[in-house]
Amino acid sequence: MTNDEGTRPPPGENTGNLPALAPVIAIDGPVASGKTAVGLNLARDLGYRLVDTGMMYRAVTWLALKRGIDVEDADAVTALAESARIDLGPPAADGTPTISIDDIDVTRELRAPEVDRSVSFVSRLPGVRRAMVERQRSLAREGRLIMLGRDIGSVVLPDAPVKVYLDASPDERARRRHSELAASGNGRPLDDIKRELDQRDEMDRQRHVSPLRPADDAVVIDTDNLTLEEVIERVRSVAGAAP
Ligand code: DC
């Protein structure tokens, strides 16, 4: 992984008049639970780096599809995950993390419907997870970052000082994804979105390796009746309260 030192304040420097914040914030949760929006806002406010681990699994999936590798072929996909040059690039103008494969920025390709449909097969392969988790841990050692995923608090960084698990009902998450897609000009029927979301949730929860679940010591926030600002405020207060 390469690193972007970009706009981060020097280590140890606090931003604004926040209390001393923990250097690593783990945010987990199911599809469309609000992790990205919350992570982006907090990372911007705190001057932290945002690492979205879902994009790493999406990058391996995209590459497998591009090379015509069967996403259920564990050996071939694992070999790809171990050898691919997947790098986190500098954030885009709006702070969104970017990702490149062999020096080509593939960020925009990673939300394609075919990647959505196949990523749960790839992310349940133990060898793929091993390769990604190793990279995620080495990124986390640099500190001052927010890491988004499914298993960050439970498996990747069990010692993270701040762990948050964002949740929301399936209906609410489908509605959010539906409006996001409509706003980006890629509108799709709500029923289709809900069905795909249920399938991905089911696969993420049922898989043997690192199933989706809150870490025992995570603070679980049910976001159904909260605005984005209210969720950010809660995560921020959890982070400020960490030892
Ligand atoms: O957050 P996302 O939708 O971009 O994640 C894509 C897929 O990757 C999702 O089906 C779950 C999986 N994933 C995972 O298994 N572990 C992570 N730490 C992050 C994502």
Image: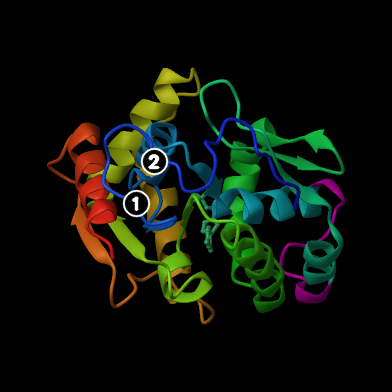
Q: Which picture quadrant has residue 119?
A: bottom right
Name the residue rendered at 26%, 40% in the picture. 232
Q: Which residue is mark 2?
A: 14
Q: Are marks 1 and 2 in contact (CB under 8 Å)?
A: yes
Q: Which picture quadrant has residue 118?
A: bottom right
Element type at marker 1?
A: loop
Q: Which mark is residue 153?
A: none
Work out whether mark 1 precedes mark 2 in sequence or the reverse, and give the earlier one: 2
Q: Give x and y (percent) for residue 47.
A: 46, 36
Which residues make up the magenta segment? 66-75
In the displayed structure, would residue 95 be above or below residue 67?
A: above
Q: Is residue 121 visible?
A: no
Mark 2, ligand 1, within 8 Å: the answer is: no
Judge by depth and name the residue closer to the eye, 115 or 189.
115
Q: Is residue 144 magenta?
A: no
Q: Give x and y (percent) for residue 194.
A: 35, 46
Inter-mark Cα distance, 1 to 2 = 8 Å
Q: Which residue is mark 1?
A: 21
Element type at marker 2?
A: loop
What amino acid is found at the position of numbered circle 1 in the picture?
Leu
